[in-house]
Amino acid sequence: MSESRLFSFEFSAPKTEEAAEKLKTVHGKLAELSPHFFSVTYGAGGSTKDGTKQTVLDLTTTGSVVAPHLSFGGDKPELIEALLKEYQAAGVTRLVALRGDRPSGIGGTMRMTHANELVTFIREHTGDHFHIDVAAYPEIHPESTSVESEIQYFKMKVDAGADSAITQYFYNADAYFRFLDLCEQAGIDIPIVPGIMPITNYKGIVRFSDLCGAEIPRWIEKHLQSYEDDPETLKAFGAEVVTRLCERLLEGGAPGLHFYTLNQSVPTLKIWNNLGL
Ligand code: FAD
């Protein structure tokens, strides 16, 4: 471990064998940085459920700590309980507990089980075995009706037994620090690790940010737009902007950084090296 701060890397569950092979190489490169853990996303609709489990089990055998993301989705409690036991038996010690997003193509009738209920369920069935991370939204979750309710529901996840949190990505450090202040006022004292999204393209990041409620400051978007046909300049600009953000976060007391790696090693390594970690 490079230091006591919490550094972690997130992968998306690969959907093809070729992608799974490529991910093993990426994992190998990032494992050299000795992060606290890797995490692997979960498609609550079933698209990547098996891929998540397989990836977690494969990477766990390399000696890395690997945390599966988990949601109820439309699954019966027995199925989730069986999955928890399987992870426990395989030596998995961390989980990221989420409500998850409704998979595209699935109608609106399925009740989405909130993350606090999943945390309660995990604690009921596996006690203190897992370190549980939950999601936090410094720029406020798109479905939230107010800042107050955002904090109130976040606190419910913590009170249910979450050990730490990872934020949605953002490019405005003030949103994160304000969120920390509000959490402190509400008596929330778990580590809240900022999620860091490297910038490697223009249209993709704009589209994705619209969906998940992350704001791209106008000046950043205008630069990305200008460099759209010049990928090298765009990536260099993106790495510089995100490095400065990480510096500010760490200097301001963030307990670590969680990188959304996009299943690539280069963008994360670039920021890591810039930071001199
Ligand atoms: P919740 O905490 O349940 O919150 C969802 C909304 O409901 C919020 O507006 C909240 O204020 C409100 N709310 C919360 N609890 C209650 C309650 N008890 N009653 C009423 N309202 C409530 N998505 C995936 O599909 N797969 C992944 O692997 C994945 N990984 C992620 C990892 C991180 C670090 C983050 C930040 C997000 C991830 N997401 C993933 C996206 C996430 O699933 C979505 O943001 C989802 O819309 C909300 O999930 P949540 O766990 O934050 O939900």
Image (cartoon, grey):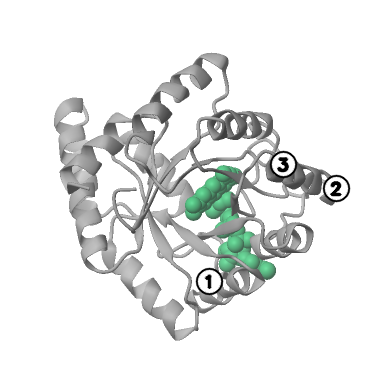
- Return the x and y of residue 154 as percentages of the image width and height: 55, 70
Q: Secondary structure at mark 1?
A: helix
Where does the image place residue 144, in percent across and percent down from the top left? 55, 66
Quarter of the rendering containing residue 17: top right
Q: Is mark 1 within 8 Å of ligand 1?
A: yes
Q: From the viewer's perspective, is 162 left or right of 174?
A: right
- Residue nearer the viewer, 195 or 91: 91
* Gap between marks 2 and 1 measured at Cα: 30 Å
Point 54% across, 26% down: residue: 14
Give the residue number, with chain letter if any, for mark 2: 78
Report crowding for label 2: few under 14, some 14 to 19, many 20 or more residues within 10 A (C-alpha).
Answer: few
Which amino acid type is marked by label 3?
Ala
Along the line of sight, the residue nearer the viewer: 51 or 173 = 51
Under mark 1, the amino acid is Glu
183 displayed left or right of 124: left
Q: Residue at x 67, y 38 (%)?
A: 90
Check residue 89 in the rendering and tell me which mark sits there, or answer none. 3
x then y, percent, for residue 19: 50, 19
